[in-house]
Image (cartoon, rainbow, N blue to C red):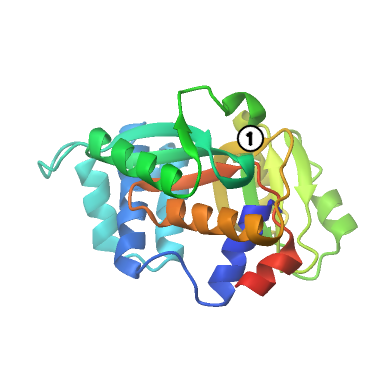
Amino acid sequence: MSGHSKWHNIKLRKGKVDAQRGALFTKLSKEIILAAKSGSSDPEANFRLKVAVEKARENNMPVDNVKRAIARASGADGGKEIEEMRYEGYGPAGIAVILDVATDNRNRTAGELRFLFSRHGGALGESGSVAWMFESRGFIEVEHGTLGEDALTEAALVDGVVDVRYGASELRSEIVTEPASVAAVRAALGARGIRITSTTLGFDPKQTVAPSGDALREVVAFLDALEEHEDVQRVFSNAELDIAQLEALA
């Protein structure tokens, strides 16, 4: 699995999830709103919405909250419109970062993110400033259970799969796919009895940076600050974070 996914899982195991439940529900609601706006309000006819609703349920978000978020996508509640935006920049140790953001005030969000980058020794860049370092990919996190690496790789031999990243020291692994194939691969894995814990469309770095020592601590603090921002939905970076060092930091 990617380094930052490892860090996220370590925080979950140790109870260091990024924010209070209310803040998590806000992020989940925003994703549901954006997903419903992008297509049908029926999860069975809108893959992105289906994934967003599943994630909400996995995090015990009340059904009424889900329904309100879907309704808000049509402007039914008269609330401020949620915009989907993407930011790019550089962080400590020269790591490259791409952020998916959902906001009802782009000027406020841009100012706050610019401050976060600056405070951690980085800089917010222009559109395309770091995107060339990444490839668009689908990421399917699965519980491999008793399956070994070879068995999981064989089970994931599906058209559209780019890589299988086995979590040797964890119970979860990551299946990387072509963006257009993520839904079909997800369905195929489910049909083979593999439990899927999350599905994301995002970015995979072509090359990674492996910070260590104080630089690693600075990178982790920076990535945590970004993830904890209320408008940041997803964080992608080219930081390769060593699992043993992350355990020591947690």
Question: In the displayed structure, does residue 158 sit left or right of residue 222?
Answer: right
Q: Quadrant of residue 65?
A: bottom left
**In this figure, which residue is indicated by the disc labeled 1?**
137
Residue 139 locus on image (x, y percent): 63, 45
Question: Label 1 neighbourhood size at 10 Å, few (<14), some (14-19), many (20+)?
Answer: many
> Where does the image place residue 60, in percent across and percent down from the top left?
39, 69
Quadrant containing the N terminus is bottom right
The quadrant where residue 35 appears: top left
Residue 246 vs 29, above or below: the answer is below
Disc 1 is placed on an element classified as strand
- Most extreme residue toward the right is 150
Q: Is residue 42 visible?
A: no
> In the displayed structure, does residue 168 sit left or right of residue 114?
right
Q: Position of residue 214 (x, y in %)?
A: 64, 60
Relative to 135, residue 104 above or below: below
Residue sitting nearer the eye, 197 or 118: 118
158 relative to 54, above or below: above
Q: Residue at x 21, y 45 (%)?
A: 71
Residue drawn at x 58%, y 75% as measured from the top left: 13
Asked whether residue 78 appears in the rendered view, the answer is: yes
Q: Is residue 54 above or below residue 105?
A: below
Q: Nearer the viewer, residue 244 or 148?
A: 244
Q: Quadrant location of the C terminus?
A: bottom right
Callout count: 1
Q: Residue furthest left?
A: 78
Q: Measured from the top left, where is residue 36 in percent x and y?
A: 33, 39
Left or right: 129 in relation to 207: left
Would residue 41 appear left or right of 246 to someone viewing this image?
left
Residue, x 40% and y 44% (percent of image)? 43
* Amino acid type at mark 1: Arg
